[in-house]
Amino acid sequence: MNRIKLKHSWLVVAVMSVLVNSVLAEEVANVALVATGSTSYVSGDTRVSALNDGIEPRKSDFRDEGCYGNWPKQKTQWVQYDWSRPISTEKISVYWWDDHMGVRLPKTARLFYWDGQAFKSVKASGAIGVERDQWNDLSFEEVITTKLRLEIEGNEEFSTGILEWKVFDSGKSSTFPPRVKANADRSVMLNGKTYLGGDVSALSGDCDIQWSKVSGPGVVMFADSGDVDTTATFSEPGEYELQLMATQNGETTADTLHVSVLHGPPAENLSPVDTMPYKIDSPLWNQRAKAIIVNWIPHCIDTISKPDLKEGGINNFIEAAKKLRGENAEKHRGYIFSNAWVYNTIEAMCVAQMVDPQGDQMMIAAQQKMHDTLEDWIPKILAAQEPDGYLQTAFTLHPDRKRWSDKYRTYHEGYVAGYFLEAAVSHYMMTGGKDLRLYNAAKKLADCWEAQIGPPPKQRWWDEHQAMEMALVRFGRFVNTVEGDGKGDKYIALAKFLLDCRSGGNEYSQSHVPVTQQYEAVGHAVRASYNYAGMSDVAMETQDIDYQSAVMSLFDNMINRKYYVTGGIGSGETSEGFGPDYSLRHEAYCESCSSCGLIYFEHKLTMAYHEAKYADLYEETLFNALLGSLDQQGNNFYYTNALTEHGARYPWHVCPCCVGNIPRVLLMMPTWMYAKDASDIYVNMFVGSTITVPGVGGTDVQMVQKTDYPWNGTIKLTVNPAKASKFALHIRQPVRDVSELYEAEPDADGILWIKLSGETIEPAVENGYAVIDRTWEQGDTVEFELPMKIQRIHASEKIAATRGEVALRYGPMIYTFESADQPLDKSLASDAELSTQWKPNLLGGVMVITGKWADGSDLQAIPFYARSNRIKKDEQGPVSKVWIKEQ
């Protein structure tokens, strides 16, 4: 064997990529394996490294194992290999990617070699083939070079792509050391194992593989230190560096990875506070809630109710019901997952009706409309549920589609079903359990899934788009609460089974390897955040140490390498998803739905670890990335939330997945504000409100917050237990720098002072919470003040986009600069004096930051959430920017 390619076995079992000479029957080395690839342009959902990853393509339209593409670029593009030493070649082979959509076979392709000064055409008697589903060879006069460039000319308006590009050694190439890449940095729980692996490529013969400890406080035990795919355990907590080394023909290459060994979470989890009737008393949140309830949700209702809605709405349920009755029915409209925004809007209506209108006639009228809409929609939806409980109109209207099949794995069966389960929980809470129509239908649906999917003899399956996993855990917990006797446990077990089935797929849907071996946030950001939230739920319910290790690894990678200062995720460099570590361009994707998923993920970590830092994070996302997705009046929204914004919001989207998701999450205020266990209440967010936390210290506790936060930091809590009771109150002490990517000055963390019923106290601090443990009686008060300062934020030098730039924050609010107030090409002096000013008549009332630009002109910054409400007609260029030049 002249060339060995060792790939991480859970990525792919790679064949040896061997070209057999028909005359000599000899194997020829593919020197592309030790090259470094580059390109004129790579599309967001592909990668240059796929050019030479050693994976044999199956067909030209099969991209799950990786591909390179340059969509939406057209005409001529190029890809290039560079070698550290000269290679000799006289033949290449290309396998083209053709997705039958925007990426098609090229018109022509040409090969060039580097002669030391310029690229020159190779001398060949023919041209590179452009056929699909096969290798396209080109033979030419031998060249000795360190660079090859493949120039690709697109066909008509189409882009081009490649699944694999081989370069064959003519027998005179230099020897090369092995190419080694250890896998991602990660965390692991003490007494748990971490799954090691990596890529090792070599051109000839076998490599000697060796894992070793470079540094760390304890002993590292490898299951097999000579196998690239192995596991390691650790004797002590701390920070470790491990090395993967490959040696061949006396030449050695090594790469390292970092492992944080952590203590596991507490054995007992906190419980969420399900949203129930509550009152808001906050200058900011009253205005935002009213806009959502009076304008946005009614707009969603009206649009989804349209009989001819092309994106699909209630019309699909009406037609599915006809189909079930044996009547003629129209085809399914819109995306196959169009039921999702109907269910999200139902949940949004339910939580909106739990907000006390406090006599506001517009809110009362809107809530009545929601009540009437539910009475109209619920029978139509239930009529579309199949007799065995299955419910997805895209399948009912096309009975040829087999449920839970590999063929239709991309049809979002779990994504849609999960939203229905969650809507049913909120509907139960809204009606106080008096209306069980959706709850019973949800149980029937969950039972349908549980009867079919599971260990043998049931079916093994997973969905391309996650949502069912965390929904099943939420629903299972809820069933256990309302029915007892562990009746919801089977749904929680199904959630784990669905997650355990994920492997053999792709990074886009986080199914490339088992979830317990995923350590880097990759792929579609919404799917990822839902997946990680579901994993967090399963980790809490099972205490599975592999789940705990993977969850913390994914959290660390996302928050400390791929997280925006606004609390958004998803740079958009892969399709609607994550880019590489530290690649955080200002034209971010930050889909609104991914902000919702991130809030869920961090909230679940708060419950698992009882640590305030996770609430610090979801507060940042809630107040910035998500709150800013809707305009001031609640008439338009952003699907994406870039940090440099170029355009206005819009009333609808071709994929309206966010329209119901945004309001349901924003209005779940009790859930985000409080968590509990039998003897503790955790105060995680500060919003003027009245909310009842049930079942603490043997009683229900009404919590009243009086505050103008986030505009000032004074907060008063009144604790009203239904009866005098002993329990602990944990009050979050905010930490503003929630990610290692960003540092701000001056310091604005913690609590300045705290008083219990008027007396200053110094409570103990545990996990970022000030803890007051006592017997509480009605009317007891806790007052405290958070430091509110203008902070200048600087990002890590590892983030190229923010070098030489600064951002501003006040409290939890990130600020942005708008073209409505000043040109956006100005610089801020590092010592410029800045101050805050309350402007009641601007954007519904906001605290602005004012000062002078470096050129002496007036500066004004507004909260990020309030951006793009004053866009001028036909305005060109950026209309708002978070990051500005600093001098």
Image (cartoon, grey):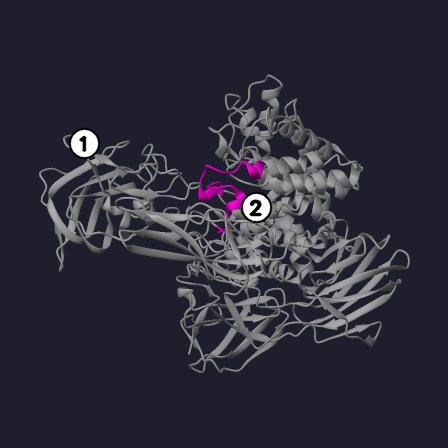
Q: Residues within 10 Å of mark 1 (few under 14, many from 20)?
A: few
Determine whether the residue tagged by mark 2 lies in a helix, strand or loop.
helix
Point out the frontmost of discs 2 and 1.
1
**Residue shown at 35%/37% (left/top)?**
101
In the rendered image, residue 393, in percent from the top left (x then y), is placed at: 57, 29
Nearer the N terminus, badge 2 or badge 1?
A: 1
Determine whether the residue tagged by mark 1 lies in a helix, strand or loop.
loop
Q: How many marks?
A: 2
Q: How far is the residue under mark 2 from the one under mark 1?
A: 51 Å
Q: Which mark is residue 572?
A: none
The residue stretch that appears in magenta: 498-521
- Asked if residue 264 is positioned above or below residue 456 in the image, the reply reads below
Camera-side residue: 337 or 218?
Answer: 218
Residue beneath label 2, please?
Answer: 530
Q: Which mark is residue 25?
A: 1
> Is 742 covered by the magenta stretch?
no
- Asked if residue 583 is positioned above or below residue 159 in the image, the reply reads below
Q: Residues within 10 Å of mark 2 (few under 14, many from 20)?
A: many
Question: Which quarter of the rendered picture does the C terminus lie within?
Answer: bottom left
Q: Quadrant of residue 479?
A: top right
**Residue shown at 62%/38% (left/top)?**
495
Camera-side residue: 292 or 513?
Answer: 513
- Side of 379 relative to 779 (left or right): left
